[in-house]
Amino acid sequence: MTAYSSAEPLLSVRDLRVHFPTASRRDAPVVRAVDGVSFDVPRNTIVGLVGESGSGKTTTGRALLRLLAATSGQIQFDGTDISKLDEKRMLPWRRRMQIVFQDPYASLNPRMTVAEIIGEALDTHGLARDRREARISELLTRVGLNADHRKRYPHEFSGGQRQRIGIARALAVEPDFIVADEPVSALDVSVQAQVLNLLQDLQRDLGLTMLFVAHDLAVVNYLCDEVVVLYLGRVMERGPTREVYARPRHPYTRALLSAAPVPDPRAARKRILLKGDIPSPMNPPSGCVFRTRCPHALPVCAEQVPEATLVGTNHHVACVRVDELQNA
Amino acid sequence: MNPNVVLSVQGLKTWFHSRDGVAKSVDGVTFELAKGETLAIVGESGSGKSVTSLSIMGLLPKPAGRIEAGSIHFRDRAGIEHDLAHASAATLRRIRGAEIAMIFQEPMTSLNPLYTVGDQIAEAVLQHEGGSRAAAMARAREMLERVEIPAAAKRIGEYPHQMSGGMRQRVMIALALACNPSVLIADEPTTALDVTVQAQILDLLRRLQEELHMSILFITHNLGVVAEIAHRVAVMYAGRVVEDADVYDLFERPTHPYTRGLLSCLPTDALLASGERLRAIPGNVPSVLALPAGCTFAPRCPLADADCTRAVPELLPVRPQHRARCIKVATI
């Protein structure tokens, strides 16, 4: 893990909202996919963004790269609010922020060779013009692929190798920041470990800053310096990974961590079983969005949206009962 | 068949014939499922775990998929043994759904979107047990209550799309258990679900198993889920069972180099505390169209030598009730 830096974070998200209208009518109901999310990504660290389906983790990742339009809020990247830049002024920033997608089958053009896929990224930003081929070989080697395979097509590679191609494409433009959106969820366990080790090496060697979007809690614990826990478009808890995992303070984080299956048949299981399912983001509960499934909810939870309360160094919890529930 | 065993698969080979050649998806699978036991079959994609379950159910896509060798012995409610690998269509129809039931990963694609959930459960009851429609609907409602669907009386008239993923999987379980089968095959039943909902479904399956004394063949790629639910485990790799053991032996004394490799790929608390990196298994799972000679894991195995590629290793005893398909079992 990287030492904690007190310098200004590379990325700062404040009160980000992404609402999707369900029809073109002006009064059509909206899906509140992301509804007031704030967090920081410090330089040279990996921050995990975790949550179940419908929590808004993928939407958040895409909105902060401006791949989706934010409804409101600020996205400070290296000191500049990029949330309202037009496409032309956005281009230089795009070079600095890249994405690796979940599905390596769907995110590579099947009609392009590996060299064309990586070369396209270089050309878009006018990079390595005089040494294009050498740069492509360098990138393939860097991600653990054979540079001789540059003329091959995506279907000639395994899932893990394809994910390496996706990583090489992201690295081609020498970004500072990478959003890795569930990069190992579609891979088999034995291949997952290879890709996780690669991401860790790259982060360390190239001084990258990364937002790792995931639903696998064990993987986040292994890889991430800090973690942000999302539920129904809002941040429930965020803080240093080790601390949040050892002493989760939000009732949702506690339930989520206790529900994750542990590969040890003798593990003591004190499971907090939540009732029901995640409510619809079209009609989220008033006040705290988790209250309908929370074992500790009170009437007050329906009335006010809980503020993020500081409970430790960089550790924030959005729960009105956080103090009373400390030892619950 | 041992009287305690309800399902016994011996030397099963299921191959698929296509223009590209013969895919040996299942190429020597052997295991026994005892009464009231949960046996987990764990493996990565392409290991043959789902084809094994489809072979048992007689649901292989025809004519491409064929059982080439081996037997699948099942003891029915009357105590009569059947070899499902060679049973008639009529016998399979009588057993399938009534005595061996199955649930799948994606409940949305296994439920009919045009019928209410109550109708679908009632249809299964009428098909296998006959009786009146009113009695079948009453059973449907009882089953929905049994799988803890809130307001079952109201939801019995709903369509699958009106329900969440977790609720749909509960409906699938209700449908599978409606005729009181002695064996439930659960093929990745929680893989598409969120972790808090997965915990609910695992908890439900565990309770239902105790109440109904059924045997569960639980197919999964998730070793965490295996540790939660299984009594015994069979590890599959490239079409073969490479190790079987009770769940404690498997996690505490894994023997086959593949099982060991799989366990050390996982980011466990112990690994985190040690500060070490994940130990990935090098390479990839081989194609079922071109399996390596001898031990199929040899090309990725740190212990492999020339002897490993000479012949397919047997499942060799490691200790009582624990076997591994590795010629080096004595020295590991």
Image (cartoon, grey):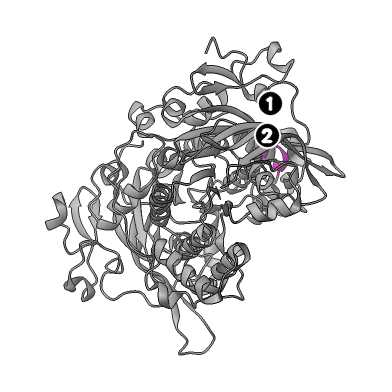
Q: Quadrant of the N terminus of chain A?
A: top left
Residue in the foreground of this view, choosing between B155 and B5? B5
Q: Are marks 1 and 2 in contact (CB under 8 Å)?
A: yes
Picture residue at 47% right of the left edge, 38% below the top = B223
Q: Please tell me if label 1 and label 2 are on a single chain.
A: yes
Picture residue at 50% right of the left edge, 37% below the top = A202
Residue in the foreground of this view, choosing between A111 and A125? A111
Residue A223, compared with residue B142, is above or below; it is above
Question: Sequence-wise, which precedes: disc 1 or disc 2?
Answer: 2
Residue A134 falls inside the magenta stretch: yes
Q: Residue B296: give its label.
A: 1
Residue in the foreground of this view, choosing between B242 and B119? B119
Is residue B100 toward the left or the right of residue A220 in the image? Answer: right
The percent coordinates of residue A268 (x first, y second) are: 29, 38
Q: Is the stretch drawn in magenta largely helix, strand or loop?
A: helix
The percent coordinates of residue A167 (x first, y second) are: 58, 45
Residue B227 falls inside the magenta stretch: no
Circle 2 Cα neighbour tier, 10 Å, few/some/many (<14 / 14–19 / ≥20): many
Q: Quadrant of residue B79?
A: top right
Q: Which residues are the magenta region? A: A130-135
Residue annotated with mark 2:
B239
Q: Quadrant of residue B273?
A: top left
| Residue type at numbered disc 1 | Thr
Residue in the foreground of this view, choosing between B246 and A147? B246
The residues bearing labels 1 and 2 have C-alpha atoms spaced at a distance of 9 Å
